[in-house]
Image (tube, grey):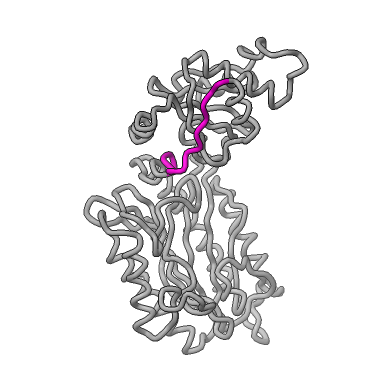
Amino acid sequence: MEPDFSPLASFLDANDLGGYLVDADGADSDQLYLSGFDAPDSFVTLYAPDGVHLLVSGLEYGRAKKESRADTVSRTAEYDLQRNVSEYGSVEGYARTVTAFLVDREIDSVAVPRRFPVGVADGLRERGVSVTVETDDVVTSIRAVKTDEEVDHVRAAQRANERAMAAAERLVREAAVEDGVLRYDGEPLTSERVKEEIEVTLLRESCALDETIVACGAAASDPHNRGSGPLEAGEAIVVDIFPRSKATKYHADMTRTFVKGDPSDEIRERFDLTDEARRAALDAVEPGATGAAVHDAVCDVYEDAGLPTLRSDPTTEVGFIHSTGHGVGLDVHELPHVSPNGGELEPGHVITIEPGLYDPAVGGVRIEDLVVVTADGYENLTDYPIELVVE
């Protein structure tokens, strides 16, 4: 199922623009989405009323013709003949090449994303091409509404994620407790060792990740502390894994909190309250609801229990100190927002629900599920138990 680019066509028409131009490599998610092509070096994608057009190096030409969703693929060499020899490798020469590519398609005005290369934009303007920086996040908004195929990609990545989470939990479960520290195979069980197990498991699932979080005790009170050192008995261990499929490039995201040994009453209460907040947020997810309303459902649970949130106290450094969630797809953080400024949810939006509580004196607790908004509510793409104590 191909993406629906009609909102982009409408944007161009409303602003009297000839096309939408991206100059980036395949790591840029808007580039990957528009072109359907992944390359390690920058290339040009033009979206115009008559289709999608690529300008790539000769090195990528054959692969782009086979793999991209473009209607036409051109090589930079086709336009390099219009350069002076002294311009090879220069921004000026490259701008001349891109200009010739646009002129060939009778395009004299383009919108570009905010991160478009400044030197190229200036070079195009010097050659008579009108360049408008697009601030409406049109492509990002289109990406936020997933096709059935994209949802399947996320679901598959989440299955791999769950197997990685199970591997992490197994190490914690099988660890012995000695002098308040977890030990595995006679060695202290560290955050680094658990992260290694997660990464190896994901590699076997054809997934990869740059970072993961295994944070224990006070370290877990900082939501994005990656964690380090020995894991302690009786302390909350926050495990947050957000891998990307190597084949499809789509992400998954999930967090669980574990304790090996006897947690304090405070940790138990905060875990149960966070699970209640998670369920309240899920109950609020449906088409037409706003991300702000889902976020408010979480804040209501915490505030009713007498705990601070950024809604009740914008200066608080403890309690619920982040938004409820975010979109997930080609980026692990993308639209829509599930936060105080979150807009209307639509079928096809894939979002996280991840309430949490944080206090250095207690530690951190977070539970995160990944769901897709459907026509009549939501489908939870996460199939993993929510249990605090592992034995």
As drawn, 275 above or below 205:
below
Residue 156 inside the magenta-drawn segment? no
Identify the residue at horizontal 39%, vertical 46% (top origin): 144
361 or 209, nearer to the observer: 361
How many numbered marks are there? Answer: 0
As drawn, 117 above or below 98:
below
Give percent across and percent down for residue 361: 57, 85
Q: Which quarter of the rendering shows the N terminus? A: top left
Residue at the extreme top of the image, as rendered = 81
Give percent across and percent down for residue 165: 51, 62
Q: Is residue 93 left or right of residue 295?
A: right
200 or 245, nearer to the observer: 245
State whether residue 303 appears in this view. yes
Quarter-of-image position of residue 360 = bottom right
Identify the residue at horizontal 51%, vertical 41% (top origin): 29
Residue at the extreme left of the image, as rendered = 376
Give percent across and percent down for residue 323: 44, 65
State whether residue 1 appears in this view. no
Identify the residue at horizontal 39%, vertical 27% (top origin): 16
Identify the residue at horizontal 39%, vertical 86% (top origin): 306
Give percent across and percent down for residue 226: 62, 65
**The magenta segment:** 128-140
Residue at the extreme right of the image, as rendered = 86
Residue 134 inside the magenta-drawn segment? yes
Q: Is residue 224 left or right of residue 379?
A: right
318 or 10, nearer to the observer: 10
As drawn, 380 above or below 265:
above
Q: Is residue 29 left or right of residue 190?
A: left
